Image (tube, rainbow, N blue to C red):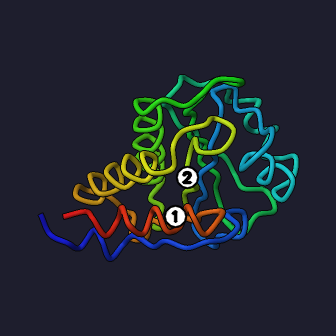
Amino acid sequence: MSQDWRAKIHLRQGDLTEADTDAIVNAANNDLMLGGGVAGAIRIKGGPAIQRECDRIGPIALGEAAITGAGALKARHVIHAASMRLGESTTEAKLRAATRNALKRAAENSLKSIAFPAIGTGIAGFPTERCAQVMIEEVRKHLGGETTLECVEFVLFDRRALEIFERVLAEQN
């Protein structure tokens, strides 16, 4: 397989809500309730329009992803990747499906750039190391096929998460 996929992946530490991409990905629950963590930051900075749109769409199946507008955010869309139920944990299977479906929603909407957080590693308690492995594997598979995506960014909240994602990406063949 060509190594071209690697050039399309960018890693950085920062605030996901400030990403200037076509879409940012919300680490969502399947009810699409924008509570705390990443979702809360999106709700606060993006404004109430995003939650209103989520209310019209949700709930969605675990592992699914839904796309909405982005309100006052720099991004044009928010893709809500549902890897957990409210009050429950994320599993590898749910994380894998949510990542894959977020990438599908981006391609279906002809988006060129997307920014992901480390889905499930906050309140849902998924280990950052395994999260990086799963998400990078899914992005690699997606970029190896037909897609409109030219840039997949991982915006990590802290230095430790960034270092883990950098190492996992470097270990990919």
- Judging by the rendered image, the residue that carries numbered circle 2 is 118
Point out the image quarter for the C terminus.
bottom left
Asked if marks 1 and 2 touch (Cβ < 8 Å), the reply is: yes
Residue at image position (46%, 62%) is: 164
* Residue drawn at the location 57% of the way across and 64% of the way down: 160
Q: Position of residue 21 (x, y in %)?
A: 58, 69
- Nearest to the observer: residue 145 or residue 86: 86
Asked if residue 110 lies left or right of residue 23, the reply is left
Q: Is residue 73 above or below residue 50?
A: below
Q: With 29 as the anchor, is 73 left or right in this view?
A: right
Task: Using a 10 Å C-alpha cutoff, classify the residue at mark 2 as few (fewer than 14 neighbours), some (14 to 19) or many (20 or more).
Answer: many
Name which residue lies at 64% across and 23% down: 88
Position of residue 6 measured from the top left corner of the image (x, y, whole percent): 30, 71
Quadrant including the N terminus: bottom left
Tell me what residue is drawn at x 80 percent, y 47 percent.
40
Q: Which percent across, then down, holds residue 13?
A: 61, 71
Give amino acid for label 2: Ala
Where is residue 5, by image quadrant? Answer: bottom left
Quick one: label 1, few (<14), some, or many (20+) residues within 10 Å? many
Instruction: Give the Cα separation between the discs numbered 1 and 2.
Output: 7 Å
- Mark 1 or mark 2, earlier in chain: 2
Q: For the view shown, which residue lies furthest in the bottom direction?
A: 7
Report the amino acid beneath label 1. Answer: Phe
The residue identified by callout 1 is 154
Coordinates of residue 42 in the picture (x, y in percent): 76, 53
SS under mark 1? strand
Q: In the displayed image of the protein, which residue is found farthest to the front?
A: 160
